[in-house]
Structures are given as C-alpha cells and as structure tokens.
C-alpha cells in the first residue's frame, strides 16, 4: 500500500528534514532510519486526509483544512498554514512539493489511470494550482499506479522522463543520483523534489535502499521519502521493516486507525 510507504518515509526522513540538522558527513548507507528524533509531519497528516476524502467522498479542500486544524504545528509551509486557517482563502498558485507528498492514496485507490490523473489534479488544485504543482501530484500518483500495476522501472523512467526532461529541468529524472548529489541544494518545489524522489526509487533495490538513496542528498528529506516511498512500496510489494510496530510507535491512535481502515 503506497500510503504506508509514504508515511514510513515521512517518519524516517523527519529526523533530517532540514539541511542544517543533517550531519555533513552522514553515513547514509549505515545510519539508523528510525530513531528517537523521528516523528510524523505534515506529509503524514495530509496523506491521511487524502485517504479520508476519497473514502468518504468529501471535498479535498474541506478535508485538508479539517486535518490541518486538528494537527497544527507539524511543519506546514507558511502559505499553506494561512490557507488552512482561513476558509475564504483560495488556491495560491503554489508549486511547492506539498501537492506531491499528499497523493499516495490516489495512486493506490483507483482502478484506472484516467481517474488517478483526474483526482491527483483535483487534490492539487485547491492549493497548488500552478502547472508545476499539479504536475508534481499527477506524476507522483501515476508512478505509484504504474508500480502497483506491475510496470517495469524502464516504463516508469520513460514516463517520468517525458514529464521531467533534462532540457527543461535542473534535477531531471534523467540524471544519475551521483550527478544530482554533486549539485543538489535543499529544495521544496515540486520540480526540485518529484524527479529526484523518482530517481532515488529507480536506483534502489528495495524499500530500505530507496530511503538510503534519499538520505544521500541534502534534501527536504521527509517529503522526498514520502513521495518516493509510495512508489517504492508498490513496486517492491512491501517493506522489510516491522511496519505495524513502527506505525503504532510513531502515530497516535486516531491516525493509526485510519490507516488500518
Ligand atoms: Mg513534512
């Protein structure tokens, strides 16, 4: 289930969310992935809100606001935080990675690609209505859907390459992680997050090595791990960690009960 991969990614990556708290010499191949510093963040809350909206057939905007108000101070961006608090606030043309980090359940829920695309757009548009904000959500959800339906890495790469070609994107999915690692700077846009998260997945061998690839970059780690975590979980058909004990340790009962629905 993509949402489980996404949320586990958020919890793990939260320990080094910001560049300044990430040790410069972090040994990403051996470091602990779930520590006392880990917690759930906005990526988890909004991923769960998307699940509730789809399960109960509620508008995305209302559900995001409801969960945002129930769980304040979990790392929302400034603009999104304002949007949560004011019912009258409209979409604000964002291309932040917030649209891509909340759509894992869309990729696991629908039986056809057209619905995945249409609902990914809807989930993004209530806040992130910039074309890149919408694209970030659509590409993430479609990659999850493709992985779930048994697409190969080559097929997922070809799809992502059409959306993020190197002619137009600084961190195109066409660049190797080695190359990205040499130039990457902390970035919270969709363009600076989605192709990179997909590349971390493409160069992985299992869910854990996907996380470690993300750890190798000085990135918005919880969100990169959330975006690619959904794809990796679906592609590898599971996670080798003890998922239930991690989720019950880090989530509260309410959030955990929604995931179990
Ligand atoms: Mg976060």
Image (cartoon, rainbow, N blue to C red):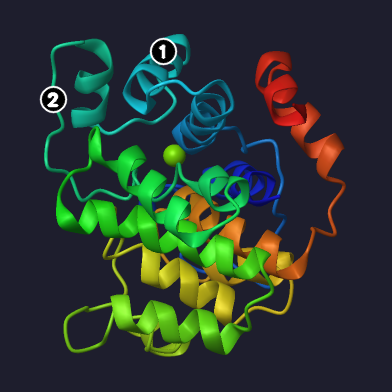
Q: Which quadrant of the view contains residue 249? A: top right
**Which x, y percent locates residue 91?**
16, 32
Residue 58, image x and y in percent?
44, 20
Taking the image in four quarters, ligand 1 sits in the one at: top left
User: Taking the image as drawn, is residue 178 in sight?
Assistant: yes
Q: In the depicted view, which residue is nearer to us: 35 or 13?
A: 13
Q: Is residue 231 above or below residue 57?
A: below
In the structure shown, which secondary structural element does the residue marked by tag 2 occupy? loop
Mark 2 touching mark 1, by CB under 8 A? no
Q: Residue at x 85, y 59 (%)?
A: 240
N-terminal label among 2 and 1: 1
Q: Which mark is residue 157?
A: none
Badge 1 marks a residue whose secondary structure is: helix
Residue at mark 1: 66
In this view, 87 is above or below 257: above
Q: Position of residue 62 (x, y in %)?
A: 35, 17
Q: Position of residue 68 (x, y in %)?
A: 40, 18
Residue visible at 15% across and 50% down in the picture: 130
Q: Which quarter of the rendering shows the C terminus?
A: top right
- Side of 61 relative to 140 (left or right): left
Residue 15 showing in the rendered view: no
| Residue located beneath label 2 in the image | 90
């Amino acid at each position: 289930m993509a949402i489980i991969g996404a949320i586990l990614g958020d919890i793990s990556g939260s320990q080094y969310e910001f560049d300044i708290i990430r040790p410069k010499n972090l040994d990403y191949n051996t470091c602990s992935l779930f520590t006392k510093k880990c917690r759930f963040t906005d990526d988890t809350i909004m991923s769960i809100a998307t699940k509730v909206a789809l399960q109960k057939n509620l508008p995305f905007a209302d559900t995001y606001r409801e969960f945002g108000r129930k769980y304040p101070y979990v790392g929302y961006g400034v603009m999104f935080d304002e949007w949560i608090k004011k019912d009258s606030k409209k979409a604000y043309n964002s291309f932040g990675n917030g649209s891509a980090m909340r759509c894992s359940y869309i990729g696991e829920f629908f039986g056809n690609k057209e619905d995945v695309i249409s609902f990914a757009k809807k989930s993004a548009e209530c806040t992130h209505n910039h074309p890149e904000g919408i694209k970030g959500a659509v590409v993430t959800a479609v990659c999850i859907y493709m992985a779930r339906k048994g697409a190969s890495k080559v097929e997922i790469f070809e799809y992502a390459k059409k959306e993020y070609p190197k002619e137009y994107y600084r961190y195109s999915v066409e660049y190797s992680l080695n190359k990205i690692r040499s130039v990457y700077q902390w970035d919270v846009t969709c363009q600076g997050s989605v192709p990179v998260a997909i590349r971390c997945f493409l160069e992985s061998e299992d869910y854990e090595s996907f996380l470690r690839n993300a750890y190798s970059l000085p990135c918005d780690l919880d969100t990169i791990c959330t975006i690619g975590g959904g794809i990796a979980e679906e592609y590898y058909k599971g996670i080798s960690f003890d998922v239930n004990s991690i989720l019950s340790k880090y989530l509260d009962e309410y959030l955990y009960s929604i995931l179990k629905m």
